[in-house]
Image (cartoon, grey):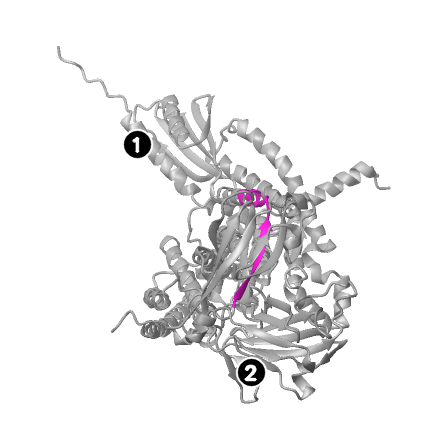
Amino acid sequence: MNLTDPALLNSYSLYALYSAMGVYALAFIAFAIDLARRSSAVGVIEAADLVETDAAASAGAAASAGGTRTLERPALKRPVLSRLSARMDNDAAMPYGRSSSLRVGVSLTVLAWALHLVATVMRGFAADRVPWANMYEFAMTGTLLIMTVFLLVLVRSDLRFLGTFVTGLVLVLLGIAALQFYVEVAPLPPALQSAWLVIHVFVASLGTGMFALGFALSTVQLLQSRRENHVLEGAAAPRGAIASALRLRFLATLPSSVTLENLSYRINIVGFILWTFTLMAGSIWAEQAWGRYWGWDTKEVWTFIIWVIYAGYIHARATRGWRGSRSAWLSIIGFSAVMFNFGIVNVFFKGLHAYSGL
Amino acid sequence: MQPKLGLTGWLRWFWRQLTSMRTALFLLLMLAIAAIPGSLVPQRSSDPNGVTQYFADNPDLAPVLDQLQAFDVYTSAWFSAIYLLLFISLIGCVIPRTKHHFLALRAKPPTTPARLSRLSGFIEHDAPAETDASAAITHARTLLKSSGYRVARFEAEGESSVSAERGYLRETGNLIFHGALVGVLVTVGFGGGYGFSGQRVLVEGQTFVNTLLAYDSFNPGRFFDDGTLDPYTLSLDDFAVAYEQLNLQAYGQPIDFTADVTVTPKGAEAEPSVVKVNGPLRTNGTSIYLLGNGYAPTIQVTAPDGTVVFSDSVPFLPQDANLTSLGIVKVPDGLAEQLGMIGFFYPTQDKAESGANFSSYPDLEYPLLTLNVYTGDLGLDDGVPTSVYALVTDDLTQQNGGSTGVDSIELKPGESTELPNDLGTVSFIDNDPAASAAGDLKQSVPRFASFDIHHDPTQIWLISFSALVLFGLFTGLLVPRRRVWVKATTRADGTVHLEYAGLARGDDPALGSAVTALADRHLKLLKSHQPIVATPETT
């Protein structure tokens, strides 16, 4: 095996990538089984019990829930908030024990991540440069970073319940990259020959990884908050209504919406700092390559829009009536804009950030 | 009857609305939405040709959009209104906060709350025996102070406590971030006014003097004085392009552009230098960027009597990746009629099945120049400026090529041919006949480089403000601001009860563990400082 032959290296990179996608798919299944198990674990316990434990856990006192739910977020959540400041409280309504499928899912994800890493590094060696100079490579490195961020965060907080989302997202993106964006190894055009390619694009991918996790947490937060509201209202409602509201029963085993919101915020602010840096590094590079630091190129416009949306998200946390679900929507819109910027703006919009042959 | 607000009342109400967080958030979201149209519709600032094309493609819609300033979104009244309001709102919010923060920086931490047990991270311990409440608090105070807390000590009946606060940098960073954003906006808004940008095309061997008239196009800022241009000279000595030749997937892709130049400052020695894509040359207060390149075939037109009426290397604009290039030659004087030529240059000519010429490789392997000749009125005598890159053929008669039935002129480097109508001779001069004779055509046609020359004295400000923005973000978002209290109460039996608690001011994920760590360190300190119980000494 001649490891200096770019074509051969690239084909090994492809084998590794397709293997990684296969293992990600298995991990996805394991995580999905875990969610199903969570649901059935919740189902075992009587709905009546559920309402009680739940109201007690998220509200502290159900009585105060009665009439005070107005425009603001339920006041009853406030006292919980400050105490939730500890790194990651497991304040799930329903304790959920050890899960073998969850462990299998994480192990498979780590294996797939290793293959993914090998694929990316080999592509880099095949091209003899950083592996993020076109859409295909950027997608490969970007998803690798999303996964890396996820696995690193797992060391500190138990966010394994996001496994289905993260492996699913990475699978879809890698699938699109491999089928639609694939290009053969090509040398860097002079316009991309810059140290800023390494810095600007890498930090942008890292920021994207953060925003992806923030998005996932905000989505679960919205579902969770809907469930919590149903549980609170359901205390007085007939049983049938509760049952229908609790279709995503596994939510009971996940942290409360306030915890999810705090986690999402912490991850998104790191993403925001990285994004700010991306924008500035891009400006410096633009000045060197195009002679102006800012020219409202389509990609610049969307990078700016994303920056403003997340700035709004951060301010929303300090704005009356915007904490909670509304700010979660901003995080979701923000990440949608990130995906739009990557997938749509690059491919369909005219601009200076056009990648050679995608 | 409602009480009247009066003018001041209304202004105050308006100001309060504008500077509220809710309005700021609303304006931020508006700004994000307002920026979108600029990515959907071509903008005059970044894509003027796209705008022209848009008008041609949508003759009904375009004027309406133009009325709405959709082609100048980022300088439009509505976009400007949003960001100006946003920045006024920001300033209105930041000023009182700065004042407040300034006072807080000098204020003592607040009195210890009566019931610490209601606060987060609350821990209680019994102090080691023989501990003195007041001494315990002294230790806690030292400990907190060395950890960067600002401390205040409070004494009450039977209890001592220390109140501590840290993380003032969080608010400082926050204010710096917002202030620096204003700085960025002001610099961007006014900065461009003090500089200029100009374009100039140079063929290999040509020299340019940095004066107003020497530019092909020149855009001065509002406050820029042409007189301050520093008249240095810039010569393009050589323009080299490297093409990928090993990787068959990318065969012929340019992998390097290098412009070897000589810069001669006024009254100083000439210094050789290099301009590359991504590698501008900073010299004499200007930045010189390499933004384009192509071929400039040397064309000579000779009148029938042998007088050379035109001889120049004409920059041909590249039309595709293999540098099929289009150029215009205008010969207004010296011939029986005014002469215009539309030329195509193929660095490596090839013929499609249809018979059309195309270039199959961007380097000079088999160069060919084709010329379509027009005679008549070039329209140069009316005093109306015309583009050197376009030929208006309205008042011209086409003599060959196209539908005339006469073949276009085809020339290889070094060849000449008769012009139609016995107008004279046209030659395609070979730049390096000796090498061409030996079979190497690489130097037969000179190349041109198009340079952008910019001067912006405010960029240093911009980068400084940007650095402050980043610094402000890091500290404003990541430094935890928190209050911590330690209270020691002496019980009736003489033992000391210790309480620890914290309060987060802003997002503070580590508060609980910080209080726990403080308690642990404090207890350890108390144990190590325990008075040694006096053992009766033997005499």
Q: In front here: A148 or B82? A: B82
- Residue at image mark 2: B357
Q: Chain of mark 2?
A: B
What whole-number distance in Å separates the C-alpha atoms at marks 2 and 1? Answer: 88 Å
Q: In front here: B452 or A205? A: B452
* Furthest residue toward top: B539
Residue A308: percent from left, percent from top: 59, 54
- Locate the N terminus of chain B by quadrant: top right
Residue B535: percent from left, percent from top: 19, 18
Q: Is residue B492 magenta?
A: no
Residue B399: percent from left, percent from top: 69, 82
Tag 1, which secondary structure? Answer: helix
Residue at image coords 53%, 37%: B172
Residue B198 picture quarter:
bottom right
Give the magenta range.
B446-464
- Which numbered disc, 2 or 1, marks the residue closer to the eye? 2
Residue A22 picture quarter:
bottom left
Which of the marked residues, 2 or 1, is nearer the chain's N terminus?
2
Residue B44 picture quarter:
bottom right
- Answer above or below: position of A252 versus B150: below
Residue type at mark 1? Lys
Residue type at mark 2? Asn
- Residue at image mark 1: B524
* Furthest residue toward right: B1
